Image (cartoon, grey):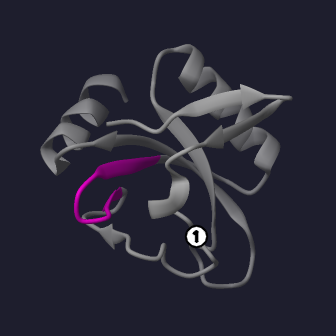
């Protein structure tokens, strides 16, 4: 499964962001599987990059979508210092193995 990412009025949105919504700490039901792989217990994704500037994240997101990847951006506080960063995420995948294989094949 993959998120539905749309480009509306210059903004990217995701219809399935509910399981990956970050409020400055850990994503609510996210579990870190390795350095960049995450799961909610059912679906899997991986962080491709991290940006301080939202425009940079959105530019990368647009390029990934144009290249055919299922991607989205979420706000994060990866350093626990109350600074907002933007994660570019690829997913979702049914298994960790599929997520890892996809990353190895394309990135």
| Residue 70 drawn at (x, y percent) | 45, 30
The quadrant of the picture occupied by the C terminus is top left
**82 to the left or right of 99:** right
Which residue reaches farthest front? 15
- Give the crowd class for mark 1: few <14, some 14-19, many >=20 residues within 10 Å: some
Residues drawn in magenta = 37-47
Which residue reaches farthest right? 9
Q: Which residue is mark 1?
A: 22
Local SS, label 1: loop
| Residue 94 drawn at (x, y percent) | 20, 44
Kindly identify the residue that appears in the image at 69 percent across and 42 percent down. 57
**Vertical position of residue 78 compared to residue 63: above or below:** below
Q: Where is residue 100, by image quadrant?
A: top left
Kindly identify the residue that appears in the image at 58 percent across and 15 percent down. 66
**Vertical position of residue 37 compared to residue 95: above or below:** below
Kindly identify the residue that appears in the image at 35 percent across and 42 percent down. 92
| Residue 1 drawn at (x, y percent) | 31, 37
Whether residue 74 appears in magenta in the rendering, the answer is no
Whether residue 43 appears in magenta in the rendering, the answer is yes
Q: Majority secondary structure of the magenta segment?
A: strand
Q: Where is residue 62, by image quadrant?
A: top right
| Residue 48 drawn at (x, y percent) | 47, 44
Front residue of 18 and 92: 18
């Amino acid at each position: 499964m993959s998120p539905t990412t749309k480009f509306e009025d210059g903004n990217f949105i995701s219809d399935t962001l509910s399981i990956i919504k970050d409020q400055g700490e850990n994503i609510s039901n996210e579990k870190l599987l390795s350095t960049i792989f995450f799961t909610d217990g059912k679906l899997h994704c991986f962080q491709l990059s991290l940006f301080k500037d939202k425009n940079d994240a959105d530019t990368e997101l647009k390029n990934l979508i144009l290249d055919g990847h299922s991607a989205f951006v979420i706000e994060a506080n990866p350093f626990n210092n109350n600074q907002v960063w933007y994660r570019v995420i690829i997913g979702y995948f049914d298994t960790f193995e599929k997520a890892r294989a996809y990353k190895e094949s394309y990135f």
